[in-house]
Each structure stands twice: as structure tokens, then as C-alpha cells.
Image (cartoon, grey):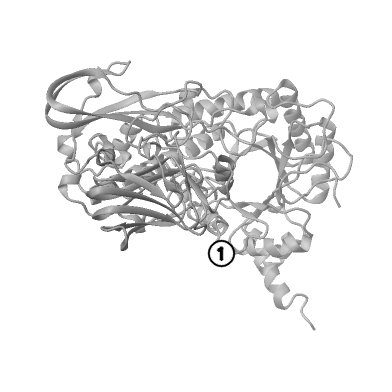
């Protein structure tokens, strides 16, 4: 007799059985597995994201959506209020967190209870993670900033230290305080003030009066050397459309050890070449090029001590965002690059320090070790003087400067400016400081209190989960108490090594790289323990569990994915339609979620499934789904089923596979 299942179909069935068999009670016979496959338990059914788009919500639509999900075999839904999507527009919109919105959530919880469906709600409006209008500036995501001045001793220095940048946004410093606009929002707090002897090799490149030329002729280099990221210069290719270059010509040979570039369009592919006569050049450094997810960027590349008269940068690759260049220059993106800084350093700098200090994310740290440097280019940690107790609230300080040249650095912190997205105005606000236990708990308490009040006994019964989507809030590398956290976790004081966070070499290159490794490790631990763990602990006490991508494929933070996923109840990964290649980040993300479920004994491992598709056929999706089942997933959460507030067809849509009651 021919077997019922054979060949590839038999293998596929076996894989599917394994994928959800972990969800079933322990059984002694294969027949129970087969029965479970024919009539899956509720725990084995897929869930779906349920996007409430642009405040177009109706209670009638909620009921019809949920009844359709029940008929279709979907086991639950995740409410996501977003400023996105298109299609149906209701006569009267229902805005996020309004009394009408809370009533709509209560109605959804009541209908989910009636229909025995699992209800989940996103952790904020939009999907970027944990932010909202109730987050105060002091509770928001922060970055390290600083200013510095040089003083000569012996003398009694009495004066006001330059104010570090208080702009909201990514890194705004290079070596001095950048200028800021009077119209920009400001938040700033002092952290620590240090002084140290200036390494003998350190000189301001401007004192050597370089003549700067490009393929398009000579240019004024002032904006490229002023340590101000708000000023910029467009470098044109001239006649050679295939090559853009800029050259610094010095009257006498100078010795350089590092190069800093800054560009809103990203760092292009290129190289630094040098010459003694302007004719015969040799390569001393290769630029890293654009990094994934990196548009605007500041990048420092160190290289072996090099003496020459001519230093030339050649760019042969496209910048990260050519549209930015076109908008600024009205020329083709392959004929011009716009930079706010191109600066040679005579003193040593930590190779790729902006990445290593957590201002950006570097995907592989092993190939970017810093060059060995002489002691004349380094800061002796024993010579660092802590002046923090001597600074007044307005930045005034009085200090008896010892003999020699000294640098005074004023460290503080301001905001990254990140806000949750895409959120309607009623739900938009700062992303909370994710390194802080205190601010994270304040955030989730404020978010859930009105929901819990509106739902009453349905909170924790019908509404069972909060979903933590992928981290898309950008980088963060500072918080109020990070110095004490660092000392408790790493066992030594970061204070004398603070200049490493601005690129200076303290002790030697190896020590500096290791200090920055410890700093990144501390950030990774704090993101997991002070954010994800705090959210889950708080919600669990209320009878709510968490789904969490923690932190997902965006790779914007210095994460330990396994550690982050330890602190959610259901770890999640993410995969997109047409994304089967193992080298893609989705593979690592899915395997990370699967690994976390095994390591920490979590029976359910979920995936945001089929993002980025459209109107694909079920069979097309099955082929993709089968692959991701084999990677360890046992629960799909469809992306997406947009809420259908009205009955008109083809209905309301959101980005992703369209799975809703108004399509075939």
C-alpha cells in the first residue's frame, strides 16, 4: 500500500510537526502529534499584527476584524497604533490615548475575551519601541558630549569652560565645542571635568597652514578644520567624473597619525595617499566606506606614523545618501561629496573610536584594532586630574595649573533627540532612556495605567501581552549614573580613561581599546537589564507577559541579543518576504531567537513574519514559511492585518503581506 505521505511532502510535514510539537503537552504516541497537526491547539495558531492606521478606527470594524480572525484560524492579534497605511478614512477619527481610543481598546479586549483570542498591545505608538509625549527631556535617550580648551602653566586659571554641545541629534563634537543654533531644543547636564598634559605629538593642523586643492580647484579649508559639524564644503570632481579628490599641501613635511571625516551623506569608499613631491604617491589608509544603517557619520581612521608634504584623499564610491548631496549642490552624486570635516591629526587617535565608544554601531571590532603609538602621543592615566568638584553650575572653574601645556575637558550629556515612530502626534514623544531602570519603569507605568483603568478586569486576562518591536530608536551611550554602573560591573573607575571616549589614547592603544570594550560591554548589559528586564518584571507583576524582538535586526545599539531575549517571555525574530539568504541579518536574528528559547527554556519562539510583501499567494508564502520553521520558529506573527474600520473594498492597507477580511 502506498504511504499517505511520501518524498518532500513527508519531510515538510515532519518539519512542521516538530516546529509546533514543543507547544503540545507531553504525549506517548505519534497519533497525538498527527491529531494536533489536523486540529492545532490555540498555542500553535499564528498571531498577527493588527495595525490601527492614522487614527481610522471603528468599534464595528474591530468586532468584524476579530470575528474574521477567529474564522480564519488566527489565534491572536497585536494592536499597533501607527501613523502609516492608506485606504479607508472614517468620518470621526479616534486619537491615541484619548478616552475614545481607550474605549476602543477596551472593546477589542472584550471581543477577544468573547472569541477566545489572545490580545497583545505594542509598547508605544508606532513601532520604534518605548517613547511617548509623557517622557520628559531628562528621561529621554542621552549621548556623551564634551568641550575642551588648552591652557599653559604655571598659572591660576579662572574662567568659564566652553559649554559642550546641547543639540539634539547624533554626535556633534570632534575636539572642541561645536556651535549650536539658538532655535534648537536644549538639554544638558555636566558629568565630569578632567585635565591632562597635552601629549607632545598633538598639534592643531591649522598652524601648518595647508594649501587645499581639489579636482575643481583650490578651496577654503576653514569649514573642514573648525571642529564644527554644522559647516560644510562641497568637493567637486572637476573634469574627472570618475574620481573626487582633496589634497592638503604643506610647505614642510608634517607627521600625521589619524584622519577624521564627517559627512551628512555618509563616508564614501576611498583611500588616503601621501607623497613627498606631489607626483609619486603611496597608500597609508583605506576608508571603511558607508556602513549599514549609517547616513550622517563621523569617522576617525588611524594609520602608522607618516611624514609627508602632500596628503590626498581619493573617493571612488558613492556616498550613503546621494540624494542629500544632490539637494545641497544640484550636481550629480558621482561628481561631488559634501563634508563638514576632513582633519588630519598629528597626535594619535583610537582607530574608529566613534564606533567603539558607542556613538555608532560597528559590526565587527576585530579588524579595527588601533595602531601601536609612542608614549609621546598618549595620555598617562596617572597624570589625569579630576576637577569636577571645582566647576560651578555656570561652568566657571578656578585651578592652579601646573607647569606645561594642559587640556581641560568638560564632559556632559545631552539628548539624542530620538522619538517613537511612526506615531500620530498624540502618541509622539521622546524615546525613553533605555539605560535607566528608573526612567524605563516610569515610562511603562505611565503608559499602562490608563489602559489598565479602562480595561478593568480584562487587563491581564483578555489583554495578555505587550509587544516590544525591533529597536529603531537609534544609538545611546550615556545615562545619569553610568560611571557608577561601570565601576560596579567592571571593577575599576572609568574616570581617568574618559578621554578614550573622545578618541584619545590613554596608557597605550591596547589599554584604550580594552577600556572601550569594557564600556561597550557595560552598555550591552545595561540595555538588557535596565530596559528589557525592567519592562518584563513590571508587566509580569500586573499579570501581563511580553513578546520581544529584543532588540531585532536594526542593530542600532551595542546589544547582546541572547541576553536581551532572556528578559522577554516570548523571544522573537523577524523575516521579510524575499529574504531567504543565510548571509542576511534575518537569519542571525531568527537563529538568535531560537537559541534564546532553548538556552532559557522558553517553549514559544515567535517571528514577525513576511514583512515587506504585498498580495502574494498562500503557496508562495508557504515556501518561505517552511524555511523559517526549520530555523526554529514555532509561532508566526503575520505582518500584517491592517484594521478595517469600514466594509468598503479593497479596504485598508499597511506595509507588509495584506491579510485581512476585505481581501480574497
The residue sitting at 16% across, 45% down in the picture is 376
Give the number of callouts: 1
User: Which sits in the foreground, 444 or 574?
Assistant: 574
In the image, residue 289 lies at what x, y percent? 45, 54
Residue 257 percent coordinates (x, y): 26, 50
Asked if residue 144 can be seen in this view, the reply is yes
When asked about the image quadrant of residue 450, the answer is top right
Classify 61 as above or below 512. Answer: above
Q: Position of residue 436 (x, y in %)?
A: 44, 31
Which quadrant is the N terminus positioned in? bottom right
> Nearest the camera: 323 or 296?
323
Farthest residue in the right direction? 648
Relative side of 153 to 460, left or right: left
Q: Nearer the viewer, residue 357 or 580?
A: 357
Which residue shows up at 52% across the image and 54% down it? 318
Is disc 1 placed on a helix, strand or loop? loop
Q: Where is 285 relative to 69, above or below?
A: below
Q: Quadrant of residue 119?
A: top right
Residue ID at (73%, 28%): 106
- Circle 1 residues within 10 Å: few <14, some 14–19, many ≥20: few
Residue position marked by numbered label 1 in the rendering? 582
Q: Is residue 397 visible from the viewing direction of this image? A: no
Q: Position of residue 625 (x, y in %)?
A: 68, 60
Give left or right: position of 617 versus 541: right
Amino acid at each position: 500500500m502506498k504511504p499517505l505521505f511520501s518524498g518532500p511532502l513527508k519531510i515538510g510535514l515532519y518539519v512542521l510537526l516538530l516546529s509546533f510539537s514543543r507547544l503540545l503537552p507531553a504525549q506517548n504516541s505519534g497519533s497525538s502529534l498527527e491529531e494536533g497537526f489536523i486540529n492545532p491547539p490555540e498555542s500553535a495558531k499564528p498571531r498577527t499584527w493588527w495595525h490601527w492606521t492614522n487614527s481610522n478606527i471603528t468599534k464595528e470594524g474591530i468586532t468584524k476584524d476579530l470575528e474574521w480572525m477567529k474564522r480564519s484560524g488566527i489565534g491572536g492579534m497585536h494592536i499597533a497604533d501607527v501613523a502609516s497605511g492608506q485606504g479607508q478614512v472614517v468620518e470621526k477619527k479616534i486619537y491615541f490615548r484619548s478616552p475614545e481610543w481607550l474605549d476602543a481598546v477596551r472593546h477589542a479586549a472584550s471581543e477577544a475575551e468573547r472569541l477566545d483570542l489572545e490580545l497583545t498591545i505594542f509598547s508605544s505608538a508606532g513601532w520604534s519601541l518605548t517613547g511617548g509625549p509623557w517622557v520628559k527631556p531628562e528621561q529621554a535617550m542621552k549621548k556623551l558630549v564634551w568641550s575642551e580648551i588648552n591652557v599653559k602653566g604655571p598659572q591660576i586659571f579662572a574662567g568659564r569652560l566652553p559649554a559642550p554641545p546641547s543639540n539634539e541629534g547624533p554626535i556633534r563634537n570632534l575636539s572642541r565645542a561645536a556651535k549650536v543654533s539658538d532655535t534648537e531644543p536644549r538639554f544638558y547636564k555636566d558629568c565630569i571635568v578632567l585635565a591632562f598634559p597635552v601629549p607632545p605629538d598633538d598639534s592643531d593642523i591649522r598652524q601648518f597652514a595647508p594649501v587645499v586643492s581639489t579636482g575643481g580647484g583650490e578651496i577654503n579649508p576653514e569649514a573642514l578644520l573648525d571642529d564644527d559639524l554644522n559647516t560644510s564644503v562641497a568637493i567637486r570632481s572637476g573634469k574627472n567624473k570618475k574620481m573626487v579628490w582633496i589634497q592638503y599641501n604643506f610647505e614642510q613635511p608634517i607627521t600625521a597619525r589619524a584622519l577624521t571625516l564627517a559627512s551628512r551623506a555618509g563616508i564614501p569608499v576611498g583611500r588616503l595617499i601621501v607623497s613627498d613631491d606631489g607626483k609619486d604617491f603611496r597608500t597609508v589608509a583605506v576608508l571603511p566606506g558607508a556602513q549599514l544603517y549609517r547616513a550622517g557619520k563621523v569617522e576617525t581612521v588611524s594609520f602608522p606614523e607618516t611624514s609627508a608634504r602632500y596628503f590626498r584623499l581619493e573617493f571612488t564610491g558613492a556616498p550613503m545618501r546621494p540624494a542629500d548631496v544632490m539637494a545641497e549642490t544640484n550636481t550629480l552624486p558621482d561628481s561631488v561629496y559634501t563634508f563638514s570635516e576632513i582633519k588630519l591629526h598629528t597626535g594619535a587617535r583610537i582607530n574608529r573610536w566613534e564606533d567603539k565608544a558607542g556613538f555608532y554601531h560597528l559590526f565587527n571590532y576585530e579588524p579595527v584594532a588601533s595602531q601601536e603609538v609612542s608614549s609621546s602621543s598618549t595620555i598617562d592615566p596617572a597624570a589625569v586630574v579630576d576637577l569636577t568638584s571645582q566647576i560651578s553650575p555656570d561652568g566657571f572653574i578656578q585651578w592652579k595649573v601646573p607647569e606645561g601645556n594642559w587640556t581641560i575637558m568638560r564632559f556632559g550629556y545631552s539628548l539624542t533627540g530620538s522619538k517613537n515612530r511612526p506615531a500620530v502626534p498624540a502618541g509622539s514623544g521622546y524615546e525613553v532612556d533605555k539605560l535607566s531602570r528608573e526612567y524605563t519603569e516610569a515610562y511603562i507605568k505611565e503608559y499602562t495605567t490608563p489602559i489598565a483603568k479602562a480595561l478593568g478586569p480584562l487587563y491581564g486576562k483578555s489583554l495578555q501581552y505587550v509587544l516590544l518591536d525591533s529597536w529603531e530608536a537609534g544609538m545611546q551611550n550615556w545615562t545619569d549614573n553610568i560611571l557608577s554602573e561601570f565601576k560596579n560591573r567592571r571593577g575599576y573607575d572609568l574616570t581617568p580613561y574618559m578621554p578614550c571616549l573622545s578618541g584619545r589614547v590613554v596608557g597605550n592603544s591596547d589599554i584604550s581599546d580594552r577600556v572601550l570594550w569594557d564600556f561597550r560591554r557595560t552598555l550591552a548589559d545595561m540595555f538588557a537589564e535596565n530596559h528589557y528586564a525592567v519592562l518584563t518584571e513590571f508587566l509580569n507583576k500586573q499579570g501581563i507577559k511580553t513578546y520581544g524582538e529584543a532588540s531585532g535586526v536594526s542593530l542600532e545599539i551595542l546589544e547582546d541579543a541572547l541576553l536581551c531575549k532572556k528578559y522577554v517571555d516570548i523571544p522573537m525574530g523577524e523575516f521579510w518576504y524575499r529574504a531567504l539568504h543565510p548571509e542576511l541579518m534575518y537569519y542571525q536574528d531568527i537563529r538568535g531567537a531560537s537559541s534564546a528559547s532553548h538556552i532559557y527554556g522558553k517553549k514559544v519562539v515567535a517571528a514577525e513574519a513576511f514583512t515587506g510583501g504585498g498580495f502574494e499567494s498562500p503557496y508562495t508564502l508557504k515556501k518561505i514559511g517552511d524555511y523559517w520553521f526549520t530555523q526554529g520558529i514555532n509561532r508566526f506573527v503575520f505582518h500584517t492585518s491592517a484594521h478595517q474600520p469600514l466594509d468598503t473594498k479593497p479596504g485598508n492597507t499597511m506595509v507588509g503581506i495584506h491579510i485581512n477580511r476585505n481581501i480574497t
